[in-house]
Amino acid sequence: MTEPAIDVRGLVKRYGDKTVVDDVTITVEKGEIAGFLGPNGSGKTTTIRIMCGLLKPDAGTGRVLGMDLARDALKIKREVGYMTQRFSFYEDLSIAENLDFVAGLYRIAPRRKVVDRTLEELGLASRRNQLAGRLSGGWKQRLALAACTMHQPRLLLLDEPTAGVDPKARREFWDEIHRLAGQGITVLVSTHYMDEAERCHRINYISYGKLIAKGTVAEVVAGAGLTTFLVNGDHGGQMLRVAQDLRAAPGVDQVAPFGTTLHVVGRDGAALEASVRKIAEGAGVRWAPAETSLEDTFIQLMGASRDNMA
């Protein structure tokens, strides 16, 4: 068995009297695409910064790419590509000029050749002279990915990389992530998009500083122990009344409308089914069991967590 790309245990990070990362343990195997999920303010970014050597934990140990977090922070930085939430390049420089600057920081040689190769690989060659500040969200994202892969890192840490990007650009981005993983690069990516989480080999769910679920998507969904029903009607007014009745019924934890369909979720399957049957049949609408989605699980986990900033 080879050593995992990321193996961190019991990570803790405090700011004053607030613990923003609380006993987090994560393992990511080499070549794996690992999702990192959680609500805003849950500690994802802080954990990622610890992993890439930018922050020192107050407690805990770990190894990243076989190097010790405490002793080898500088070495880890050289082997990691970190894509931050915010676009952090010079907007009055062109795409090629930004990449040339980054290549200089990493002391990449020959710079011109590597920049040209990176532009081609990421589909940026035709836009090499376009100013970074005039790029759309999808092209900015592509530039950021180019910059953090140019030095050929063994690990990519991507912090909500597709926020505000259109669906086509997101899909192209994920195609590129899977291409990189196919070359042996390990990827840890934080995201709020459930369809993106489902593209990961495994996911880790952190809520208010605590890691509370991990595994494949199927394992995390099954571990939540939820039951789901779909309730279908013919018009919105009717389903609004049905939704109101369901929210007050025993066994119902979530009611989410999708057009004239309600997604009804609960932990007590028997009580949930009895409530759904009674209310749906009383209103003359259709109902049927359904598979629990990752989004249902995400919402349930959020609701069961306590805000560590409160």
Image (tube, rainbow, N blue to C red):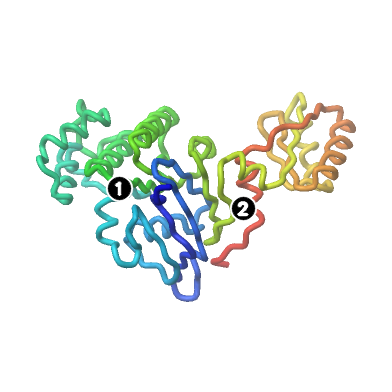
* 95 vs 70: above or below: above
Of callouts 2 and 1, the N-terminal one: 1
* Mark 2: secondary structure: helix
Q: Residue at x 55, y 51 (%)?
A: 205
278 with respect to 10 (left or right): right
Q: Is residue 226 left or right of residue 202?
A: right
Q: Is residue 279 left or right of residue 230?
A: right
Q: Which mark is residue 161?
A: none
- The amino acid type, in three-letter code, at marker 2 is Met
Depth check, front residue: 114 or 306: 114
Tell me which residue sits at (86%, 35%) in the image. 277
115 left or right of 57?
left
- Image point (62%, 62%), residue name: 306
The residue that disc 1 covers is 81
The image position of residue 161, as x and y in percent, is: 39, 43
Label 1's element? strand
| Pointers 2 and 1 in contact (C-beta within 8 Å) | no
Which sits in the foreground, 177 or 46? 177
Residue wearing tag 2: 302
Q: Quadrant of residue 255?
A: top right
Look at label 1 and name its amino acid: Gly
Total of numbered circles in the picture?
2
Q: Position of residue 51 (x, y in %)?
A: 38, 57
Question: Residue 236, percent across and down?
Answer: 73, 30
How far is mark 2 from mark 1, CA to CA? 29 Å
Which residue shows up at 58% across the image and 63% down it? 307
Label 2 environment density (alpha carbons within 10 Å; few <14, some 14–19, many ≥20): some
